[in-house]
Image (cartoon, grey):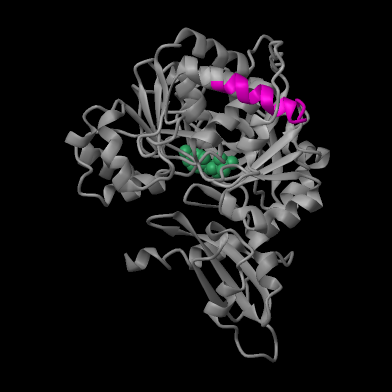
């Protein structure tokens, strides 16, 4: 699939050469950092240096470098240095707890695990069990990543460029069947997707992207950071999303990208006005459905129509509305080079029929990390990837997503596997069984809700005690409510009827708004 495609490393190297004098990255809230403002030329010099030092540290192309750390100038450079060197970048959600990381590190076996200084004690056991060297990414004391790098001697010979089909990034993603799986993305997956987005969103080298997304997820890394750097524009980096901070810096930007939850929060700020957005040429939303009401409320307040796009960890970006055709509720057209079909048991469906969404193209990952069975299940024999999402194509070839084939929950743009939460709940005292579902929520899109049946003979478990028992799960996976019920509805096969539960509990939050 990568025939003739460039590697991401080559694409970024070329952009840095071409735009050497222009501003590439800046951190308006972190002006004290020596990396707070870099031209493309300075950025690439720093990337080459760090890439050489990572290799001198003993890592080799193809090794995994895992990191769980807050978004910072060093983390950004580290990502790019991995891309340049061929070391596979494996970022973890900062909300993951040590028990979750133990599983993922045991699976991925990273050579090096980097963390925030405050997390080093918690992760010592995880690193030891996975055979990984552990270093704090940023620390004021000796013995951190910076010290380890500066003790290395960089080879004078230029580093070889990674091959287009080499693994570049690995991201763990939740399925419905329990444990997260490591999706491996190649250099070509990322490069071709960046080029497709550059065309569709008509990226310009005077664009300035206000980047408030995390760097452990597809969204913040690929359509945001890769595109800005490959497109020659300036990326204004914020460490976290905070609506007031975003609005404070919006006047310097031309583009903003976010999950629907960000737009809901921006709308709560009085400072979000048409005047505050007058420099903006593009607002992009994705990672979860953008409700029509949010699209219209944002347009009403700002005069800006959000461009919705659809993507997933395994396939980067898949479809997008175009600049001249932005429709509420619509995921847009397949990106250049991406094929998309709608199927059911009978085969490929014609326009305007709802079915499973399948895709093929240079954006689709080669498979899950060391999981040939899971990879085989995800692909048809003819090579099409089964996204697990449902929708229809209209006569004009636009995609309208109707839901997911699976019970996967997406809360605040992050995937939550119901099975993973149920497994932890079912182990708690007083719980006989549980069902975890996603329920509509104004701010989160979907809120995680657990329905729990009490164990026979005991007192019904208490909601706060159950919530307190879920500390091993990242906060975004913990239910917003735990409700004790008499029984769970089951179908003839004995399977819990999640669709029925979702319907029954759909007004749990919205009724109160
Ligand atoms: P992730 O792998 O975390 O990026 O999540 C991917 C999933 O998010 C997709 O499989 C969809 O279910 C969902 N998703 C992403 N973008 C959209 C969108 N624009 N509309 C509806 N669902 C979306």
Query: Is residue 311 found left or right of 174 in the rendered image?
Result: left
Q: Is residue 291 above or below residue 220?
A: below
Magenta segment includes 159: no
Q: Is residue 39 visible?
A: yes
Between 7 and 34, the one lying in front of the other is 34
Which residue: 55% across, 22% down? 46
Q: Is residue 417 above or below residue 337?
A: below
Farthest left residue in view:
275
Which residue: 62% across, 90% down? 459
Q: Is residue 287 above or below residue 486?
A: above
From the image, give the main secondary structure of the stretch colored magenta.
helix
Q: Is residue 453 above or below residue 363?
A: below
State which region is magenta. Answer: 46-61
Give coordinates of residue 334: x percent, y percent: 52, 25
**Image quadrant in which you'd find residue 470:** bottom right
Give coordinates of residue 29: x percent, y percent: 36, 39
Between 449 and 325, the one lying in front of the other is 449
Which residue: 53% across, 73% down? 482
Give coordinates of residue 372: x percent, y percent: 82, 38
Give coordinates of residue 40: x percent, y percent: 46, 17
Q: Is residue 293 visible?
A: no
């Amino acid at each position: 699939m990568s025939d003739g495609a460039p590697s991401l490393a080559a694409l970024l190297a070329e952009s840095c050469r071409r735009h050497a004098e222009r501003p590439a990255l800046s951190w308006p809230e972190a002006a004290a950092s020596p990396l707070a403002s870099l031209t493309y030329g300075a950025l690439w010099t720093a990337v080459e240096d760090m890439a050489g030092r990572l290799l001198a540290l003993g890592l080799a192309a193809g090794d995994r470098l895992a990191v769980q750390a807050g978004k910072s100038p060093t983390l950004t450079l580290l990502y790019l240095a991995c891309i340049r060197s061929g070391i596979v970048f494996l970022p973890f959600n900062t909300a993951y707890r040590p028990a979750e990381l133990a599983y993922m590190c045991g699976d991925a076996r990273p050579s090096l695990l980097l963390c925030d200084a405050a997390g080093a004690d918690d992760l010592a056991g995880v690193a030891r069990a996975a055979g990984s060297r552990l270093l704090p990414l940023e620390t004021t004391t000796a013995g951190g990543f910076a010290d380890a790098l500066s003790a290395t001697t960089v080879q004078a010979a230029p580093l070889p460029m990674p091959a287009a089909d080499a693994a570049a990034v690995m991201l763990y993603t939740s399925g419905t069947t329990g444990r997260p799986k490591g999706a491996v993305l190649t250099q070509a997956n990322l490069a071709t997707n960046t080029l497709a987005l550059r065309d569709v969103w008509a990226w310009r080298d005077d664009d300035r992207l206000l980047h408030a997304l995390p760097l452990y997820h597809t969204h913040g890394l690929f359509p945001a950071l890769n595109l800005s750097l490959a497109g020659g524009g300036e990326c204004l980096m914020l460490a976290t999303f905070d609506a007031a901070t975003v609005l404070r810096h919006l006047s310097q930007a031309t583009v903003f990208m976010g999950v629907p939850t960000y737009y809901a929060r921006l709308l709560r700020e009085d400072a979000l006005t048409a005047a505050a957005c007058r420099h903006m040429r593009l607002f992009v939303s994705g990672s979860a459905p953008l409700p029509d009401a949010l699209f219209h409320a944002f347009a009403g307040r700002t005069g800006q129509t959000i461009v919705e796009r659809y993507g997933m960890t395994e396939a980067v970006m898949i479809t997008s509305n175009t600049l001249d055709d932005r429709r509420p509720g619509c995921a847009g057209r397949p990106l250049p080079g991406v094929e998309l079909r709608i199927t059911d048991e009978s085969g490929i469906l014609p326009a305007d029929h709802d079915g499973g969404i399948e895709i093929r193209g240079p954006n689709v990952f080669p498979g899950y990390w060391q999981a040939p069975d899971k990879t085989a299940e995800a692909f048809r024999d003819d090579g099409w990837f089964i996204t697990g999402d449902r929708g229809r194509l209209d006569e004009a070839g636009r995609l309208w997503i109707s839901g997911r084939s699976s019970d996967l929950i997406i809360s605040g743009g992050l995937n939550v596997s119901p099975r993973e939460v149920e497994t932890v709940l079912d182990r708690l005292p007083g719980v006989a069984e549980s069902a975890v579902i996603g329920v509509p929520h104004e701010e989160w899109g979907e809120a995680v809700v657990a329905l729990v049946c009490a164990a026979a003979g005991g007192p019904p478990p208490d909601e706060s005690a159950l919530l307190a028992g879920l500390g091993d799960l990242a906060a975004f996976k913990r239910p917003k409510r735990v409700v004790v019920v008499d029984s769970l509805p089951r179908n003839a096969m004995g399977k819990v009827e999640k669709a029925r539960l979702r319907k029954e509990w759909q007004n749990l939050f919205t009724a109160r708004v």
